[in-house]
Amino acid sequence: MAGVVMMANLLVQSRRISARFTGVSARVARCRVDYRAEGLSCVRSAAAAAVLAGLAAGAALVVQPSPTAAQGQQSSNEFVTKARHAVLMEAQSGAVMYQFKADELAPPASMNKLMTLAVVFKALKAGQIKLDDTFLVSENAWRRGGAPSRTSAMMIPINTRVSIEQLLQGVVVQSGNDAAIALAEGLGGTEGAFAAKLMTDEARRIGLKTAQFRNATGLSHPEQRISARELADLARFLIKEYPEHYPRFAQREFNWLKHKFFNRNPLLSMGIGADGMKTGHLNEAGYGLVGSAVQDGRRLIAVVMGLPTENDRRDEARRILEWGFRNFTEAKLFDAGEIVGHARVWGGDKLYVGLRGKGDVAVVLAKFPASQKLKGEIIYQGPLKPPIKAGEQVAILRVTSTAGASNDVLLYAAEDAVSGGVVRQGLDSLAHLAEWALGAAFAKIKSSVGSSGASATPGAINGAAEGNAPMAAPPPVRTLAR
């Protein structure tokens, strides 16, 4: 029995499993997903029906999430960008409203300084440093980032001690490389150590998995790269985690010694609700901008990278933000406490645990085009292993649309699950081994049929996707007819 348990443990870590959902209301399903024709009056029930219909058909439960739009293709017929890379994100939910080559790595230029600021803000919040503490501007900071560098600089004299408050303003408003290096050396000893350890560790902690940092400034380095999506994620983190510091990004001017600096973010003066965040430019990277704006209580984050001119950067950032405010709305799929789906449990006192959101489950969807379709997936590392506590975050509901929107909503266990003992573990192990064998056999048959030129019906054995039939169906989901 122990050998069976061990073998199943190894298998279930990498396999794709699926689940069946029941209880989709026919009355809800008949409501058309036609935002333009229905004037959004049907968005709640239609969206819920479309998502649940996708889940009922056998939504894949995958160990690692995959991008929602093919890289290299514009994700919406309604918007085409000039940027090499672009993302539009709803700040509250993290929903991606538009993306284009969003996961390709590119030089961040001075947008890299957002990560430098994240490290400094964290140290301030932890009490490790105070705003009136001073850091020395070394010869290295002066030569590589100050007046001799002929890059954007705060023009701090060599061997001057400057307060962290002033250095922060120098980074945010003027994009001062000397100020960024001084902060890095003050916290990390050297700029290289600051980037390799503090910036990289903090990036991984907040979920930036692919970004590579080699300096605090964003100056050219062949190994320094980040994606538009992770820049948007970083901006969202800064907005949510450090509300006491976010107003810095709206500061228009900064006086330092005999210099008067003006914020380089062109969005701030456009009257579109913009209040941050950071520009960047390198010859090899082009012009980029991370921008954020609020209209009618909704905050959006836009990232554009790789534009040929400053004017293109300004116009494209404004255009994507205004398009987002015009063309997207929020739709509630499930009420607070409502069961969204179920997750399989291995070796527990129950086969499944119910999943629900924390409060209402709402997503951001495009108003147009009217013909868009929705797809829902519940994603978790499965099967779950007890003990599981009610309220523990165990899964994600991913809702995507053919208009390019992508929403990830955290799902939580609705009930406790405890160990079912050795007998239940053994039975579940045998069940998973059988499911794996059936899946492998089905894949072999499907491959053989495909190579012979015949068509195979996509779907599953016994109604489950990916050819892995659950041994027992989860409890039904309550219907959503209103």
Image (spheres, rainbow, N blue to C red):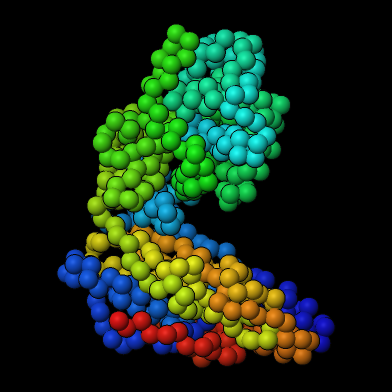
Residue 159, given in percent of the width and then of the height, sits at 64, 11
* Residue 35, image quadrant: bottom left
Residue sitting at x 50%, y 74%: 356
Q: Is residue 446 visible?
A: no
* Residue 130, image quadrant: top right
Query: Which quarter of the figure is the C terminus placed in?
Result: bottom left
**Does residue 194 lie above or below 28 as drawn?**
above
Q: Is residue 61 visible?
A: yes
**Does residue 416 lie above or below 463 as drawn?**
above
Residue sitting at x 52%, y 42%: 242
Q: Is residue 145 left or right of residue 293?
A: right
- In this view, the residue farthest toward the right is 2
**Does residue 288 lie above or below 236 as drawn?**
above
Name the one closer to the observer, 355 or 376.
Answer: 355
Query: Which quarter of the figure is the N terminus placed in?
Result: bottom right
Name the one closer to the observer, 86 or 244.
Answer: 244
Q: Is residue 114 left or right of residue 404?
A: right
Residue 3, given in percent of the width and then of the height, sits at 82, 82
Residue 68, given in percent of the width and then of the height, sits at 44, 61
* Residue 393, image quadrant: bottom right
Q: Is residue 478 left or right of residue 209?
A: left
Residue sitting at x 23%, y 67%: 40
Residue 80, given in percent of the width and then of the height, sits at 29, 48
Q: Is residue 10 left or right of residue 474?
A: right
